[in-house]
Amino acid sequence: MVSEAGERLHISMISFELGLPAGRGWDEFDEGADLCFRQRIGVYGHKLVEGIFLFDSQPIPGEELQAVQARGDLARGRRPWAYVTHGFITRNGGTWAKLETPRAFLERSVPELPAMPAGVAEHLAVERSGAIEGFLDWSGAAELSHDSQPATFEYAIQPETDLNAAGVVYCARIPAIMASGERRYLRERLLAPLSEPLVACLAAQHRRIYYFANASREEKLQIRVQARFCPPAVSAPSRVRALGHFLFRTDVHRASDGVLMSSSLVEKTLRVPGQMKSLLTESERLLGRMQVRR
């Protein structure tokens, strides 16, 4: 992608959301599984791109995608889905320039959106207020008993894995960076810390993330975490047992100046294999501490 002037353009992520329908988990998608993808994009103001994606291990009829007119339709559907918004920017020396219109958008017809994409409008609101609306029932979840230490964790950028070709943090690495802070919160800040094997059973069910700034390899990052817990719903015995949901609000800042780089809300399901008796026992203790009755 290049600008009208022929300058190379880089994708600048604005928002990303990934969801699984209730009752489905990532263990359905084993290594080597065939996947079917359906996707559609729209462009707003010749600069902002909205991407809508459906995917599954079974064929997806084309009319299913046609029925999706907005992000809300994705969340109400029966397929795993993703929603993405982004723009294109140039990099001049050590600074990032404003959003640019790709030359391709001017040379050929592109699907034009009648209104600003939801992810872009929300991005502006979240940047101003910090509130991520319409995603999780945060107030309805139980607060985890934790110590009085700040739930802020330092993260050193790993050049081999965290940086993109432009020399800044690759947007797709931010969820993993956030997850490292979420794991540390459960392992180091709870009054009754969870074991590493139990924390490894957490699987993201729904994530919404907004991007505001970036960092270079010389930076360190600070990950700030809040967490809550929802009890499991009553369900029939199965090979993998869903034993509750953790809700995380996670923010990543540059350590040098405190600038907010990214904010996310994520729901992670505690999915424990039925044969792992020690982890099932640990989960029972967790539920007991939360005074939950199944």
Image (tube, rainbow, N blue to C red):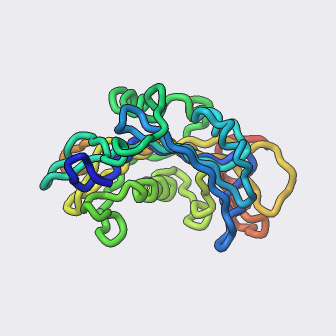
| Along the viewing direction, whichever of 149 and 24 lies nearer the viewer | 24
The spot of residue 255 in percent (x, y) is 24, 51
Residue 40: quadrant of the picture: top right
Query: Could you say where residue 151 lies in the image, as x and y percent from the top left?
Result: 39, 47
Q: Nearer the viewer, residue 75 or 260?
A: 75
Q: Camera-side residue: 115 or 165?
A: 115
Task: Please identify the residue farthest to the right as the structure is shown.
Answer: 236
170 sits left or right of 270 in the view: left
Q: Quadrant of the C terminus?
A: top right
Q: Position of residue 284 (x, y in %)?
A: 72, 54
**Residue 266 position (above or below residue 117):** below
Q: Residue at x 58, y 35 (%)?
A: 71
Q: Quadrant of residue 202?
A: bottom right
User: Does the rendering let one see residue 144?
Assistant: no
User: Residue visible at 16% across and 49% down?
Assistant: 95
In the image, taking residue 290 as reference, residue 17 lies left or right, namely left
Q: Is residue 12 above or below residue 70?
A: below
Percent from the top left, x then y, of residue 263? 40, 42
- Residue lying at 41% horizontally and 59% vertically, measured from the top left: 173
Picture mark count: 0
Residue 48 visible, this angle? yes
* Placement of the N terminus among the 4 image quadrants: bottom left
- The structure residue drawn at horizontal position 35% and vertical position 54%, both measured from the top left corner, is 153
